[in-house]
Image (cartoon, rainbow, N blue to C red):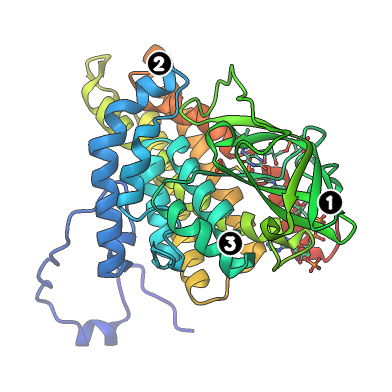
Amino acid sequence: MRARSPQGPPEELNAVADPTPAPAEEHPPIDPLDLYGVRGALSEEERQVQDAVARLVDAEVLPLIQSAFEAHRFPRELVPQLAQLGLLGSSISGYDCAGLNAVSYGLICQELERGDSGIRSFVSVQSSLCMFPIFAFGSEEQRRTYLPRMARGEVIGCFGLTEPHGGSDPANMKTHARRRGGDWVLNGSKMWITNGSIADLAVVWAMTPEGIRGFLVERGTPGFSAPEIEHKFSLRASVTSALFFDNVVVPDARVLPGVSGLKGPLSCLTQARFGIAWGVIGAAQACLAQMLDYTATRTLFGRPLAQNQTIQLRLADMARRITTAQLLALQLGRLKDAGQMQPAHVSLAKWNNCRMALDVARDARDMLGGAGISAEYVPIRHMLNLESVITYEGTETIHQLTIGRQLTGLNAF
Ligand code: TGC
Ligand code: FAD
């Protein structure tokens, strides 16, 4: 290789170089919340979906979410609006659902979680954890009975997998069902169930002599109760409940015929985890947006807070983390739309993006100083919510071990 002159390029390159300076390229302004222009990689339809949900969040969610969170109240009045926009079961084709692609579902989750994780949770559970299994594993009669009404928000669903003795290991569930004539008799309990107390329909996973099966238990069925779990410091604008089953009779026609075994519930989790990997980006963006504003206007030591190196470093780090999460989510979405997404892909994105968002929210909370503990600023609400989001749908450790198993072929659970 030829040595390069310390004064510039080799002579023969200089000889051909055009001395006229190139005209300055016109660059569009960079969006601080989308440094790599992910939006430019979206289709027109995907952008329209994102914009429609963003408008809903700005107009309907943001004005009420702080007080709903403080009051420990799920703003149920939003459900008809979410339904009207086609956000419930949006990935399902037919049955009055919107039939959108995976990236659009991700963008829906991202915009909703920019508002609050609790609102995204509602949509995740309804769409990915309840409508998806009915669509994927249900009978035609079950699909027709439930899906259109769920898409309209007239039937609210919940998903019962986790049990009080340990949610990370659902293969060892204790809730069980036995056949009795043409019916099943269900006994056991579930814990930490989103939407439980407001649900009209619970998709419940129980051990049977044939392996794990999915049961559709309607509200009001004798022996079934769903008390709300109170005193939460996280996801306060979302309902979380316990479910109890005391000799609950479920007709065979309300058992999902299309699946048995753990892959049934885990397939649902794959859908929901995908949405979470996108959703948490919205929470992190909300924190960064507020920090850019706050540090520009707060003056300390005679200059804006934003003019300090360590503050800029922290803002830059937030942007770096958000950008990498966006690119990961977009590629995950493209893989899903191409039918190539595998559970390990989702685990990596759920782990990375939840960790990213929680770290961003915690740092934003700190940069606000004392104001950071006030509900008037969004980071502490997002931070508290994200403590749940990093735990549910598989804890961080579970996803790390899933990747570890993928890399080594050895099961360390
Ligand atoms: P393992 O042997 O790995 O798998 C058993 C069967 O399932 C298949 N499978 C999957 N299928 C689809 N998607 C996935 N992600 C899958 N992972 C595994 C697998 O191929 C196998 O099929 P087959 O046909 O061979 O039987 O099972 P394991 O017992 O070793 O457990 C693996 C582990 C630990 C990863 C799993 O148990 C797990 O993911 N644990 C975490 C549980 C969890 O995430 N619970 C979430 C509850 S729901 C919730 O939190 C909702 S919050 C909602 C909100 O408010 O947003
Ligand atoms: P555990 O499984 O008891 O885990 C405790 C700790 O041990 C964790 O830190 C975990 O990472 C660690 N751990 C576990 N196994 C290992 C291992 N092999 N090696 C090393 N460490 C390990 N569930 C539903 O079914 N439906 C819902 O709608 C739902 N909504 C939820 C809403 C909220 C607000 C919350 C907080 C939870 C919700 N969950 C729901 C439950 C959630 O999925 C579980 O909390 C989660 O899966 C963890 O289970 P666990 O709480 O029993 O913790």
Residue drawn at point x = 71 percent, y = 55 percent: 214
The earlier-in-sequence mark between 1 and 2 is 1
Percent across and percent down for residue 277 are 52, 52
The earlier-in-sequence mark between 3 and 2 is 3
Q: Amino acid at mark 1?
A: Met
Classify mark 1: helix, strand or loop: strand
View extreme (right): residue: 209
Residue drawn at point x = 57 percent, y = 49 percent: 352
**Residue matched to label 3:** 142
Classify mark 3: helix, strand or loop: helix
Query: In front of the other: label 1 or label 2?
Result: 1
Percent across and percent down for residue 81 are 31, 44
- CB of mark 2 near ligand 2 (< 8 Å): no
Disc 2 crowd rating (10 Å Cα; few below 14, some 14-19, many 20+) is: few
Percent across and percent down for residue 346 are 60, 59
Image position of 41 with respect to 385: above or below = below
**Residue matched to label 2:** 369
**Residue matched to label 1:** 207
Classify mark 2: helix, strand or loop: helix
Tell me the distance, in whole angstroms, between the alpha carbons under discs 3 and 2: 53 Å
Give the left or right position of residue 162, taking residue 274 as reference.
right
Tell me the distance, in whole angstroms, between the alpha carbons under discs 3 and 1: 21 Å
Please indicate, yes or no, whether residue 321 appears anywhere in the rendered image: no
Q: Nearer the viewer, residue 353 or 221?
A: 221
Tell me the distance, in whole angstroms, between the alpha carbons under discs 1 and 2: 50 Å
Q: Name the disc covering residue 409, or none.
A: none
Q: Nearer the viewer, residue 106 or 324?
A: 106
Give the left or right position of residue 193, taking residue 247 as reference.
left
Query: In front of the other: label 3 or label 1?
Result: 3
Percent across and percent down for residue 95 are 44, 65
Residue drawn at point x = 19 percent, y = 82 percent: 17
